[in-house]
Image (cartoon, coloured by chain):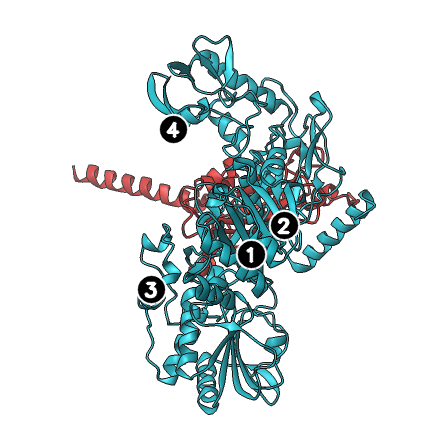
Chain colours: A cyan, B red
Amino acid sequence: MSLVRVKIDDEEIEVPEGTLVITAAEKLGKSIPHFCYHERLTPVAACRLCLVEIEGMPGLQPSCATKVKDGMIVRTNTKNVLDSHKSVLDLVLETHPLDCPKCEATGRCKLEDFTYEFGPHRVSYYRPPGISAYDYEELSWSPVLKFDPNKCVECSRCIRVCDEVQDCRALVASSRGHNWRITTFTGGPLHCDFCGACASVCPTGAIEQQPGKFWKKDWELEKHFVICSHCGHGCTLLLRGWEGRIARIEDDFKVGINRANICSRGRFGFDIISHSSRLSKPLLRSDGKLVEVTWEKALFAAMEMITASHSVIGLASGMLSVEELFLFSKLLASRNGKKFSESRDGDVIEFEKKRLGRYGSTHGFDQLDSFESIVLVDIPVEELDEVLRIDLISAAKKSGAKLFTAGRASFRLKKRIAGLFKINSQTLASAPAKTLFVVDTERIEEKELSAILEKVSSDPFTGILFVAAQSNSRALSSFGFRVLPSDEISEVDLMIAAGPLQMTERPTSVKRLIASASFRNELVESADLVFPAALPFEKSGTYVNSEGRAQYSDIAVPMAGESWPDAVIWISVMKELGEATPSTPREILDEVRNNHPELFERNYPVKSSEAEPKLPSTRLAPPKRHRGLLLDKSEWLRKLQEHLDFSKEFSPWF
Amino acid sequence: MILKSVYDGIKGLIAGYAVTITKFFSRGTTVPYPEKTPFVSERWRGVHGLFFTDNRFEELCVSCHLCAKVCPSVCITMEGSEDYLQRKRLKRFDVDLGRCIYCGYCEEVCPADAIRLTTSHDYVSRDRENLILHKEDLIEIGKSAMRRGEHGALGIRRGDGKKVVYQENRNLDASFKALSGERVKR
């Protein structure tokens, strides 16, 4: 692509051909006000706020829809241009309610910023205070999203992000002219996944997230990047919080592999860390009842239980970090314990290693558009990895990659599917060249997998992408965790369960059970000793995602109650047993790197290379005061019920 | 000469005692403090109070966080929440009097006239912890200031936004009740 020279306000810059004027100006550090322009969306030039003067063109031109040409001379600060900004903002403010102190968006509102910089400091069209031009009612679109039509500046960003990026089309525009409004398809509540992308791109406070609403102002919230732990994609979330509490989760286009795409679980699921069933103290069974005990007593009891039992097995969750899985496998190895997990990921990757001699996915999420066809093998993508669905759509749009499904179809991708395969080894082997197979590790059969791997090994342009169900299940294979067979656990003295598990009750053949868990559930109720474990935002660690990228996530919020991270729990148990163990975070990470280099093979720029990783110290921090994060639960349920009633009223098929 | 000087001495003595005796019988300027509270102007910048609105006894504060933003000594910490009518309301409001410099900016910036500096000036404590006033304490201070009739019209606004004019000899409690919609016998 050739470069062209543009002159913007007497400053010259070289940009690639086809760049928009507003992007070129941004590179020079000039701020042109805009509402409808967004770097991820197609330009529509609807708001007329970004008008600039271009020499040789009549009148003022929208800089968000004009592409640069060689020798173009642009002026952004003439009186004519500044007057146009001012009058457009004046017209917007005519219908906008002027209740900024009460508005949730204050501090991040584009209208507020641009009015401060360019706009009329006194509106020309006077309205008595408290009276808005429109008197629309605030609409509750869902329990997590609310829409105030009075604050809408009609930029249509939400409609475009819903259509172009999310491929959902839950939001539409209705009517014309002065009555132009954004509505849902039915006019009532939203029928979508509530991903919250519309609230994220809204330049004003028209669409707002409900959780965390009105808690704090934007300028009072700190920023912290963490890795999401809800699925195997490894998205980067931007936590906004204060005093160790999370108010909201935002996205950042420039940070992370997810390119500002976050699913509803990631965006609104942060309230689990203040759930009412969180464990705060170690529990020990005495006289058939679980009793709260101190950490010293619990660790001593664990030591007694482990030394007394002859056969030990361990059950690890794929949601633990690499460091924690390593320490847990070290503990099991010291007692000759068998390692199990609930995920089939370890077995599948091991099978691949035997056949191909390599670990994990061959291609990453950012290489999807280099393939001509993508075959989804028996995988409902939106259930396992919602952000991968968005990536697949953007790849199909960008490079024209054709999507095929084999086996179970993906409902949300239905419109984009070019063809269907029958799922068997022959049809998979006859897939066209330059194909990427997207595989669900929990469901793939051995026959089909071997057919795919044969094709991958024979054709260098064919790739395979294993979609992991949990945030770190890709790392299970390296530490030797295999799927738990239903018949093999016969007559075991002790089972140690680490991390969040789907198992609901302890197997009858297990005599004793030690569990580390964050919530009080059925498995915890049947255990003999329970350690309260910290949740992902409360601890640090490395996570390896579906494509094999190791990413480091730091501590964001204080631990609930007296809970410890799993790493600290297993280090303490090993010290109690008298085993040698690495004790500092740096030592743990170095040992993992030396013993399992394949986990860090895909050497992407991760955060851990920049700074010394901060793993939680092995000493218990003083318990910090922990308040409830979300709204009161009863209030939440009431809102949900209201929403359901509202839905019934408006849509007959809800 | 001697007589002259004696005369002058006595004259001076009488003049001096005259001042003393007049001051002795005149009204004092000092106040016996703990027994009697001194008079301070209504514009005195004392301890903060949270004020209330019209007859429904509702908080005026809309939780806009402007007082916390403008405070030069960063002594105000606040959190908001959504109330049952889905309005923005105050959940937590802490003022650290140990940090406060009583500049009155918070009062000035408040768009709802919710936080006002009252005339109460004798807030002392042996413990620094007690110098942090919470929302409930500030409401109490505000209520007592309203009863005293500070800040013009009792610090009370009617539903139509007009302030009630404060009158010197009016029964404050009666007018307070009248505003709250109760019938008062006069």
Q: CA distance from mark 2 to mark 4?
A: 42 Å
- Residue A405's disc is 2
User: Is circle 2 on the same chain as circle 3?
Assistant: yes
**Nearer to the camera, A70 or B176:** A70
Residue corresponding to mark 3: A593
Q: Earlier in the sequence, mark 4 or mark 1?
A: 4
Residue A73 location in percent, x, y? 39, 14
Q: CA distance from mark 4 to mark 3?
A: 39 Å
Residue A281 location in percent, x, y? 52, 75
Q: Earlier in the sequence, mark 2 or mark 3?
A: 2
Disc 3 on helix, strand or loop? helix
Q: Residue at x 66, y 42 (%)?
A: A146
Q: Residue at x 44, y 69 (%)?
A: A325
* Contact check, label 4 and label 3, Cβ < 8 Å: no
Q: Residue at x 25, y 39 (%)?
A: B7
Subunit that carries the residue with mark 2: A
Instruction: Give the position of the N terminus of chain A as an image quadrant.
Output: top left
Which of the two marks, 4 or 3, is nearer to us in this view? Answer: 3
A418 to B126, vertically: above or below: above
Q: CA distance from mark 2 to mark 1?
A: 11 Å
Disc 1 on helix, strand or loop? strand
Residue corresponding to mark 4: A27
* Contact check, label 2 and label 4, Cβ < 8 Å: no
Subunit that carries the residue with mark 1: A
- Using residue A286 as the reference point, say whether residue B15 is left or right of it: left
* Contact check, label 3 and label 1, Cβ < 8 Å: no
- Amino acid, disc 3: Arg
Q: Residues within 10 Å of mark 4 (few under 14, many from 20)?
A: few
Q: Residues within 10 Å of mark 2 (few under 14, many from 20)?
A: many
- Amino acid, disc 1: Val
A359 to A114, vertically: above or below: below
